[in-house]
Image (tube, grey):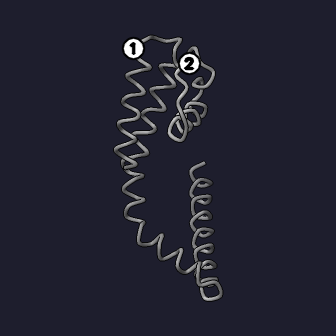
Amino acid sequence: MEGQNAIIQNEIVVIVIIIVNQLTNLSSVFPSIGLMLRTIQRSLKDIITFLIFGLPAFIGFVAFSNFTFGIRSEQFNTIGNSFVTLFGFMIKQPEMELMKYTNDVVPGVFMVLFWIVFNMVFV
């Protein structure tokens, strides 16, 4: 089983290298692709920093919402549903009705902490 995982990981690395190589070859034909690659290269440090700090916090909120609200709410009953619901909370108005069946205090505290953490991360 470990041998298969190692082979799959190696294949993924090779595929990524081939894709990057093809994109760099296209940059001579389409100059905008070269500009895009340079922009990504310059912002890679910020992207990695965001992933290091933002992703664990988001996963923590996803796990907490799944364990706390998943018992009574279909939108939080699996990790995947919790992930999609909380991502939706970040890009649109949150629906507090999804969490109201657990407690009166916990959903409010959860949403305040969620907004504080992600406003600090995104701003």
Q: Position of residue 117 (x, y in %)?
A: 36, 38
Count the marks: 2
Q: Residues within 10 Å of mark 2 (few under 14, many from 20)?
A: few
Check residue 97 in the rendering and tell me which mark sits there, or answer none. 2
- Vertical order, 101 against 56 (above or below): above
Check residue 105 in the rendering and tell me which mark sits there, or answer none. 1
Q: Do residues under tags 2 and 1 come within 8 Å of each other at their CB atoms?
A: no
Residue 18 or 77: which is nearer the viewer? 77
Does residue 9 appear left or right of residue 119 in this picture?
right
Does residue 87 appear left or right of residue 74 in this picture?
left
Rendered image quadrant of residue 26: bottom right
Which residue of the protein is positioned furthest toward the front in this rendering?
A: 93
Residue 108 or 93: which is nearer the viewer? 93
Q: Position of residue 31 (x, y in %)?
A: 59, 84
- Vertical order, 29 against 17 (above or below): below
Q: Position of residue 36 (x, y in %)?
A: 54, 74
For mark 2, give the secondary structure: helix
Residue at 54% from the left image edge and 39% from the top image edge? 87
| Residue kind at label 1, given as amino acid type | Val
Q: Residues within 10 Å of mark 1 (few under 14, many from 20)?
A: few
Check residue 119 in the rendering and tell me which mark sits there, or answer none. none
Which residue of the protein is positioned furthest toward the bottom in this rendering?
A: 28
For mark 1, give the secondary structure: loop
| Residue kind at label 2, given as amino acid type | Glu
Residue at 49% from the left image edge and 12% from the top image edge? 102
Rendered image quadrant of residue 19: bottom right
- Vertical order, 65 against 34 (above or below): above
Q: Earlier in the sequence, mark 2 or mark 1?
A: 2
Residue at 59% from the left image edge and 36% from the top image edge? 84
Residue at 48% from the left image edge and 32% from the top image edge? 62
